[in-house]
Amino acid sequence: MARRLHAVRGMRDFVPPEATLRRRVADTILDIYQSYGFEPIETPALEDLATLLGGQAGENEKLVFKVLRRGERLEEALTAGSELADAGLRFDLTVPLARFVANHLHELPMPFKAAHVAPVWRAERPQRGRFREFVQCDIDIVGEPSVAAEIELCSAGLEALRKLGISGCTVRLNDRRLLREAVEAHLGPLDDPYPVYVALDRLDNSPAEAVVKELAPYGEDRARALVEWVTDADLASAAALSERAADMADGLSTTLAALQAAGHGARFDPALVRGIAYYTGQIFEVAHPEVGYSLAGGGRYDSMTARFGGPDLPMCGFSIGFERVCDLVDRGLFATGAPRVAVTCATEEELLACLAAAPAARAARTGGTVSVLRRARNARKQREDLERLGYSEFVDGKDFVTGPR
């Protein structure tokens, strides 16, 4: 018996009907995105390491699957003791998009609305709900500096979730600039506030006192006051921090009001951080009452195109967590009622005759399926397997050729 070979840990195979469900979920999301005018794009799975390791993606940059140089370049690197890798698998779709826009700027309308549904890879420890290979469903608006971008992105993403039968979602909204104002109002000016953001991000899963202890080097009383503020603040107290903070609070009010007027749940959440460093403005996550994790998220990351030789463009994005959403989708959502017919044949002659007759049968069954198969030795198991895949009609090959179809 042949030895069974397994996929790399944290990367999965998908058999029918799960693979079919995933494709239909992705198609549904992309259909909604396109109805808003987001244009599908594609980028390579591999990017130059210089593209991926730009210093703005925080911990994700430590999780890049690196790819060795090839041939003479690898030998030269080994001899010189230099970096052996020159490429890596993308860890998200945002950095590749910025590179894409910088490279194709003169081919794109501005503002440009991009839809990008594709797998990404992170070399992290696999655990429940976290995998090394997973799909992201991104939309981004390039060239729109106002909160109109945030409003449309959240609206399109929430509509896609509703189309998948996932309702009752709430957008949690904050602003990275406002967060910095709050941090420095309590801890004083900081050259790099990112470690504080990382600590505050743990408030979702850790006791407040544990976060205070982590921030104690900044002064325990100051740290406690910051944690209390982040836990309890509203937009009024946010606006009171400073004149700049008042402008940011006003922008958040505009976004919230627009989303609420469109019938979406939305609220200000001063504890929302999002762990990636490249965010420059409003940030958001989509919560659902039945799960303890976000289903989608994103935010503004202006000027990332400048890293790749492009102009400083305003950019904002929204990403649906495809794997998490697939777990919530009702398996009967995509049932069409169209028949799935399995034609099983005993001999090769019968099989060939049924294959020749099948096109006319498919034409007569709009939206249905007609699958011609050789009858298995274990016909009972074959039928059970086909029923699991949604086949409801079973026809003997002889009857299919001679009888009405």
Image: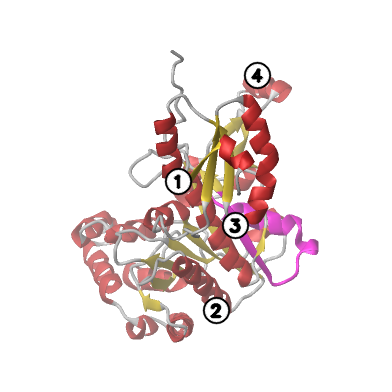
Q: Distance of mark 2 from mark 1, alpha carbons?
A: 38 Å
Question: Is tag 2's residue or tag 4's residue first in the polypeptide sequence?
Answer: 4
Question: Is tag 1's residue or tag 3's residue first in the polypeptide sequence?
Answer: 1
Can residue 49 be seen here?
A: no
Tell whether label 1 touches label 4 (CB within 8 Å): no
- The residue lying toward the viewer, choosing from 375 and 367, is 375
Count residues near mark 2 (Cα–Cα under 10 Å), then give few for <14, some for 14-19, many for 20+.
some
Look at 41% across and 43% down and name the residue there.
388
Look at 62% across and 30% down and name the residue there.
350
Q: Badge 3 is on which residue?
A: 367
Disc sitting over residue 147 in the figure: 2
Question: Is tag 3's residue or tag 2's residue first in the polypeptide sequence?
Answer: 2
Question: Is tag 4's residue or tag 1's residue first in the polypeptide sequence?
Answer: 1
Three-letter code, disc 1: Glu
> Helix, strand or loop at disc 4?
helix
Tell whether label 4 touches label 2 (CB within 8 Å): no
Q: Badge 1 is on which residue?
A: 18
Find residue 375 and report its horizontal and vertical position in percent. 52, 30
Q: Distance of mark 4 from mark 3, alpha carbons?
A: 61 Å
Look at 43% across and 54% down and name the residue there.
326
**2 vs 1, front mark:** 1
Tell me the magenta residue range: 91-118
**2 vs 4, front mark:** 2
